[in-house]
Image (spheres, rainbow, N blue to C red):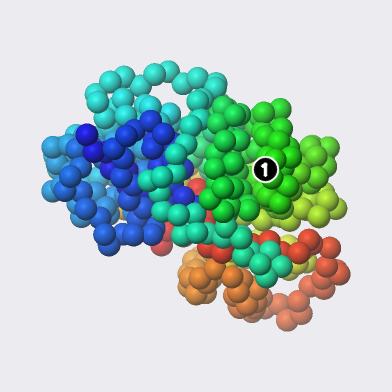
Amino acid sequence: MQTILVSTYDLGHQPQIGAELAAICENLAVVDLTRDANNVDLSGAERVIITAPMFTGSIAAREFIESHQDDLVGIPVVLAGLYASVLEEALDPDLRKRLILHALNRFRPSDLLGSLEGGDVAPPTAKREYRTNRRSLLPLTSYRKVLARGVEVTSGYVEASVGCRHRCLHCPVAAVWGGRIAVNDRDGVLADIEEQYRLGARHISFGDPDFFNAPRHTIPIIEEAHRRFEELTFDITVKVSELVKHEAWLDTLAESGLAFVISAVESLSPMVLEHLGKGHTPEEVFRARDILFARNIGMHPTFVPFTPWTTREDILDILDFVWTSHLEDVVEPVQYSIELLIPPNSLIDRSQEGFLDYDTGIMGYPFSYRDPSLLPLQQHIASLASECGGGGYAEIFEKIYSISEAELGRTKRVARPDRRAPDPVIVTEPWFCCAAPVR
Ligand code: SF4
């Protein structure tokens, strides 16, 4: 029986669920809409899985379902990912009635197949079997690379854990996992790294929502991978408040090939951070940066600059941070344009003024800015960021910084200290995670 996986958006790496499904499903075909949207053939499909990992992927999924609805009618279709139920609700009611739909927000690969067969989904467990087979996927070289000191290397992707212990109020992971995690089988993760090394990867991105959720499990995996393949480098994602608490773990990781850490700074406004429930202060952001730089580990901050509570000064604070930290050639310009997303299961408190009625089109609650001048500024920044195709970030940063300074009437740029940042290591495809430019 042929199963088709339609993968919508995976931040520029190979569709991970495609690798995990191929290990347990014999007749699997994978369609990656980010790489090959024009050659989709569902004619032989007997069952279809469509990913809805986050907002961007879910918008693509909805368009896909609408344009391929005639092929999908009459066969089981599973929507899979953090946004699965949100996507299901956002489909046209008549279309929804015509389809045999299941939505799974949190799952193991076997749950997807079980659900297609009409079976029950097994209860979640704290340990997950992790087996992968990358035969059904496009080659690693079709995906984002890592660029360091002018040398581009093939990049792979694994997950040592899923879910998150934290509950940041704006985050779809928190809304779905409710503070829980599960760890993936250690030997399976190492085997997957080994396989991707054999396929040419010389850098591995760990996609764990927070690598320090299960440090006794995750850190030894990097240590072991480094022992086996000394030339491999890694990146991980860690929350700011965890970086400042665990310097010793970073010492270990620095010695094991850790090249950079992605960290969700979001904002440098104490009020915005409070509304997002981030659990860190602006001072801790500077401290986290210094801790990483002292170990020659790069920092890839991500931002949600545009929220209902943002002021124009907050936008400049973010740009000043990037400038004074010498990160303008590292931060993907799309990050400066991100607006807060508020899906229906969001934990954000919407009882305050400024939140509008639910909008199916954006699968969330729109808001109006307290300072109306922020809307044209966001649109201008988003339009400049869209010029970026991967690399050349500093040039676009300069344009964004200049218009933001002009907007605020600032005539003299803040001084910046001498460079302390490690040599930039960037990914060659701009990406964004659980937030996105929506307008
Ligand atoms: S933003 Fe990051 S740390 Fe916070 S709940 Fe989401 S995944 Fe966890």
> Which quarter of the rendered picture does the N terminus lie within?
top left
| Residue drawn where x is 46% and y is 60% of the image | 142
Quarter of the image where one finds residue 51: top left
| Residue drawn where x is 76% and y is 76% of the image | 413
Secondary structure at numbered mark 1: loop
Q: Position of residue 155 (x, y in %)?
A: 57, 54
Q: Position of residue 45 (x, y in %)?
A: 20, 42
Classify 20 as above or below 333.
above
Q: Who is closer to the viewer here, 29 or 387?
A: 29
Q: How many marks?
A: 1
The answer to whether residue 93 is visible is: no
To which residue does mark 1 refer? Answer: 238
Q: Amino acid at mark 1?
A: Val
For label 1, count other residues whose C-alpha is less than 10 Å away and answer few (under 14), some (14-19) or many (20+): some
Q: Who is closer to the viewer here, 205 or 311?
A: 205
> Which quarter of the rendered picture does the C terminus lie within?
bottom left
Report the residue that reaches farthest toward the front: 198
Quarter of the image where one finds residue 88: top left
Q: Who is closer to the viewer here, 245 or 23?
A: 23
Locate residue 175 relative to residue 418 in the image: left or right: left
Q: Position of residue 423 (x, y in %)?
A: 76, 64
The answer to whether residue 300 is visible is: yes
Locate residue 438 relative to residue 278 in the image: left or right: left
Q: Position of residue 93 (x, y in %)?
A: 19, 41
| Residue drawn where x is 83% and y is 67% of the image | 419
Q: Who is closer to the viewer here, 371 or 375?
A: 375
| Residue drawn where x is 79% and y is 51% of the image | 292
Classify 54 as above or below 173.
below
Locate residue 290 relative to residue 234 in the image: left or right: right
- Report if the beta carbon of the residue with label 1 is closer than 8 angstroms to ligand 1: no
